[in-house]
Image (cartoon, rainbow, N blue to C red):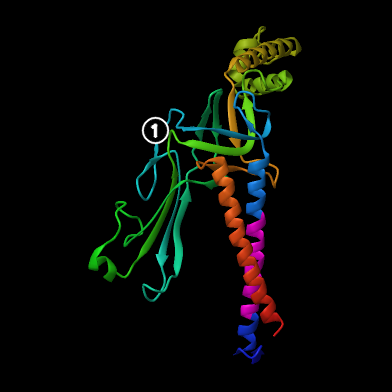
Amino acid sequence: MIDVHGVMWLSYPHYYLFSGLATLAALACLCFMLTRLQRARWIEDTPTSRVRSAAQGLVELNGMLDAGGHEPLLSPLGKKPCLWYRFRVEEHRGRSDRDNQWRTVEQGVSERPFLLRDPTGACWINPLGAQVHPKYRRRWEGTQRWPATASVSKGLLGSLLRKRYRYTEEWFLAEEPLYAIGWFESRGGGREAVDLNAISRQVISNWKADYPSLLARFDRNGDGKIDMQEWERVRRAANQTAEQQARIAGQAPVVHALSKPARRGLPFVLSDHHQDDLSRRLRHSSWWSLLGLVSSSLLACWLWLA
């Protein structure tokens, strides 16, 4: 047994368990605080761009949410028409209602892209991998793993049932403001460098896959094979096809897209909060993390010095 500063006695396993948990809690609070502060700094220091004139790379955009011609999604729990959702179902594991122990049994997030529109244009948002801070959030409880409706479980019967579930759902709505910072890319409109040789090789490869059609088209002497002169005609025809495909691609409308940066450490944040409000929320949460860091660090030091 270990005498912890005359306050309590702990067995060696419990002493090391509590000391380790306090240390891990301090490290978790430190990581959470630094992550939130870094995210707030990115939001505050990155200048806002317009869709039409945005540079390729990391950009910050402000606009309105739009479905882009798609039908609205339906959130799985509350059946809310939306453009994006995230949900979690937790099962109560405590021995009594006062025992606040929950285990996640179902969770998910939508991955379908949606549009951000500003006065200059539209940009597709691919939400996969984004750090999303939605304004709309709902939490309620029920007695089914998948609620039939969004109503709250009430009455004596619901309280007597053995299973108890807690549902959390968040979503984006159309025609709401959207703040986004991530990796911006534009396709089409002749922006990409065209490798005609690569396109030509791909065309020939596709033609070779249907060799009887290739023979019927280019075997002029009917000997059942493509000789050197005929291969030269194949290459010229493939080059013409490649040039035609490149012209068509160059005439395609420009499509802008924002997604998660490939380089680690760069932000990808989406929120329907105002930019200043989002930054303030992140800083407030970092201060709470600092408070947790100080408390858990003091507890860890107090235990380790026993």
Residue 134 image position (x, y, % from top left): 49, 46
Residue at the location (69% across, 77% down)? 301
Q: Is residue 96 left or right of residue 86?
A: left
- Of all residues, the one furthest to the right in this rendering is 228
Q: Is residue 306 left or right of residue 101?
A: right
Tell me how many marks there are: 1
Residue 196 image position (x, y, % from top left): 71, 18
- Prevailing secondary structure of the magenta residues: helix
Residue 89, picture quadrant: bottom left
Question: Range of the magenta residues?
Answer: 17-34
115 relative to 290, above or below: above
- Quadrant location, the C terminus: bottom right
- The reply to whether residue 133 is in sight is yes
11 relative to 132, above or below: below
Depth check, front residue: 34 or 151: 34
The magenta stretch spans residue 133: no
Identify the residue position indicated by label 1 in the image: 71
